[in-house]
Structures are given as structure tokens and as C-alpha cells.
Image (tube, rainbow, N blue to C red):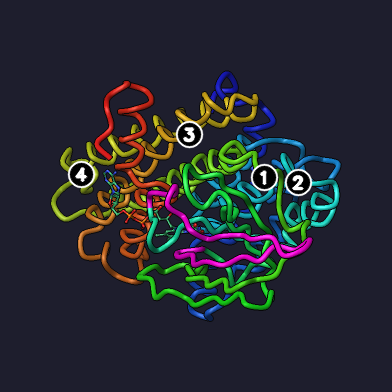
Amino acid sequence: MSTLIESEEHTALRAAVAALGKRYGRDYVARTLAEGRHPTELWSEAGKLGYLGVNLPEEHGGGGGGITELSIVLEELGAAGSPLLMLVVSPAICGTVISRFGTQEQKRTWLPGLADGTRLMAFGITEPDAGSNSHRITTTARKDGADWLLTGRKVFVSGVDMADAVLIVGRTEDARTGRLKPCLFIVPRDAEGFQRHPIDMELNAAEKQFELVLDDVRLPADALVGDEDAGLLQLFAGLNPERIMTAAFAIGMGRYALARAVEYARERTVWKAPIGAHQAIAHPLAQAHIDLELARLMMQKAAHLYDAGDDTGAGEAANMAKYAAAEACVKAVDQSVHTLGGNGLTREFGLASLITASRVSRIAPVSREMILNYVSHQSLGLPKSY
Ligand SMILES: Cc1cc2nc3c(=O)[nH]c(=O)nc-3n(C[C@H](O)[C@H](O)[C@H](O)COP(=O)(O)OP(=O)(O)OC[C@H]3O[C@@H](n4cnc5c(N)ncnc54)[C@H](O)[C@@H]3O)c2cc1C
């Protein structure tokens, strides 16, 4: 990539992470899945190399970079076939929120571990009765002396079994009605009254999704991250990185699938020339490549704005990047599977399961339609239907 778009340091980071990804790749992921375990070796090696915490402050063990660098890490691991979904959550959302709004004590307790990968934090905002409408969340914190008591339910929370704690988005009792004033709590994995149940997903991934039940979970005062009145500002400090990182996840997956299809189309010959010579095969692959490149440009813009401290500008760009990357990923995977003919559906070639996986970025963390709503209202000033 031209150094006019990406600095030499970023190009070097990309190459180094790609080399790590190559050593692991799809075979490693397939092996860990078959053995029913987490990709621990890749996670800890990436942690030791400083890649997991590349966005976190240096004084707390991170690399002192931003979401720009972290998105490069995730994109390249994904392009090698071995993405680490929890990068979207642990360093990008939780690490960012704690480093921007946490107390010194919270930073000292969590950031070094999140940075080197020895600790991991999940993130729970989605609720069964709220879904895309996060203003309707009802997980409620009430004061009991100096402590908090947290009660509610969450769904689809990723990686809770891998995590030491979950950053839970709730609201305080006096904010139960009216506009959402979210507040964020660190809930340790083994807290009393905190249960998790795996959701049976049709996803071939090490990161499972969980339903969480919080039944009067007692938390000390310092479980609250940031100010209970700072509300949406704090939440969006974590949600913009989440969108940018989901874009990186989608672009990585799209690139991985596209590369397999191109390899195949160059070799597979059923008439005189390889199938890649037929424009019906070549052009959709070329379009997929263009769409992925365009999505990456928007992702770079969003990451750049976010890292420069422009939360508002980053909000629009992060939504657009997530949208563009998800659509590019879904199309790239679909076309790649098709390019392989029957082999596209075999386990040996390993592309078919990406059809389901590629849909994740269209739904989460914010669906395609909610981004189109955002752009209709915020960017274009059109009226709201809901
Ligand atoms: C694999 C995976 C991992 C996830 N990980 C996490 C996690 O770690 N933490 C977490 O908190 N959550 C997580 N989620 C949840 C995810 O963020 C939600 O699924 C997502 O926000 C959508 O909410 P919902 O599923 O309730 O869909 P709903 O809100 O019920 O939406 C259903 C459909 O209706 C459409 N729709 C809704 N409202 C409107 C409207 N106003 N206009 C037009 N269309 C509309 C949506 O676009 C969607 O297509 C994960 C989900 C998945 C699938």
C-alpha cells in the first residue's frame, strides 16, 4: 500500500502481523475448533508481540497507538484466515473506555493485562427486549450503601467464557425512565448472582455468544467506570472503535475468501482456459476487490478521525465504514463460494461456513438498517419513522 495513505510504520506493522497470521491461518483455527478450544496460542503470541494492546497507553503496557493500528492487526489476522474477534471487544471497547474514563486504579488493574492479552474483558449492551433500540435497556443499578446492586439480562454477549470480566452497560435507578443515561460496570466473571448460558449459534467460531442473567449482583463502588452522569459520551467512546474494528474484521474475512477464490480461479480449468478467464467469474471478483478497498479507505478515515480526537466526525465515518465493510464482506464471501463450484461447499475448502460468519458484521454491533437510519437522519436530515 502507498505510504501516502499509510505510514511506513503502519505498512511495517501490517507486514509483521500478516507474517504472524500466516504461521497460524485457517488450519490453526480449524484445528482449535475441532478440539473445542480457544485460539490461546495465537492470542498469547499476539499479546507478547504487543499487537493486542497496540492502541492502549504506553504507561499502562500498551503500544501508545490508536484504533488505526489495532484495526490493521485485526484486518491482517483475518486476511490470513485467523481473525481474533475479541480484539473488537477487549482492547478496542473495554480498553478504550477504561483508558479514557477509568480511575488510575482501574487503569493499573486492567490495562496491562488487556494489553498483553493475559486478561480479557467482554462487553454486554444488547438486551432481549431492547435489541437495536438501546434506549430501552433496563439493566438497572441501584445504590446499597457504598455498593451497587446490578440486575438485568443481556443477550449475544461474545466471549464471556474467555473473559475475566464483562463491561456491562446499565442505567441507574433514577435514570430508569426518560432518556438513556448509560453507566458502565465491570462485572467479574465469578460475581455472585451472575450467570451465563451459551446460545446455540450456527457459527463456526471459537468465540461463543452468551445470555447473561444478573440478579442483584453486588459490586463495589469502584466497579463503575467513569462518571454515572457522563452518559452517552462515554459509551460512544467505546462504540466508535467497535464499529471501526468490526469493519476491520469484515474486510479481513472478505480478503481471505477472495484470495482463496482467486487462487482457485487461476488454476481450475474445465474448458480451454482457467475459469478465471471467464468474465462472469473474473468481474464479480474484481468488484469484490474494489468494494473491499473502498471500505478500507472509509475505515482508515474513521480510525484517523477517532485517533485525532474527533468523536463526532468519527461517529459518521465509523458507521459508514462498518456498513461498507459488511456489505463488501458478504458479497466477497458469496462470490468466492460460488467461484469454487461444488468445492465452495466442502469442508476441505472451508469457505461455506464463512457465509454465516460474514452475516455477523451486517447485524452486529449495529445492523445495516440502523446505519441507513443514522445516515438518513444525521447526515441527510430526513425525518424519522420510529
Ligand atoms: C455473533 C454475534 C456477536 C455479538 N456480540 C455481542 C457482544 O459481544 N455484546 C453485545 O452486547 N451484543 C452482541 N451482539 C448483539 C448485536 O449487537 C445485536 O444482535 C444487534 O445490535 C441487533 O440487535 P437484535 O439482534 O436484537 O435485532 P433487532 O433489533 O431485533 O433487529 C431485527 C431486524 O430489524 C431491523 N430493525 C430494527 N429496528 C429497525 C428500524 N428502526 N428501522 C429499520 N429496521 C430496523 C434490524 O436492522 C434487523 O434487521 C452480537 C450479535 C451477534 C450475531
Label annotation for residue 318:
3
> Judging from the image, what secondary structure is the residue with disc 2 in?
loop
Residue at the spot 38% in from the left edge and 26% down from the top edge: 378
**Does 163 sit left or right of 109 as displayed?**
left
Q: Position of residue 358 (x, y in %)?
A: 36, 54
Q: Quadrant of residue 39?
A: bottom right
Residue nearer the viewer, 2 or 214? 214
Considering only order in the chain, which callout, 2 or 4, is on the residue closer to the N terminus? 2
Q: Name the residue under label 4.
A: 281
**Does 294 sit left or right of 206 as displayed?**
left
Q: Do the residues labelled 1 and 2 touch (CB within 8 Å)?
A: yes
Nearer the camera: disc 3 or disc 4: 3
Q: What residue type is labelled 1?
A: Val
Q: Name the residue under label 1.
A: 97
Q: Which amino acid does label 2 sit on?
A: Gly
> Judging from the image, what secondary structure is the residue with disc 1 in?
helix
Magenta stretch bounds: 132-157
Residue at the spot 27% in from the left edge and 24% down from the top edge: 382
Eyeballing the image, is 237 above or below 150?
above
Q: Mark 2 points at which residue?
A: 102
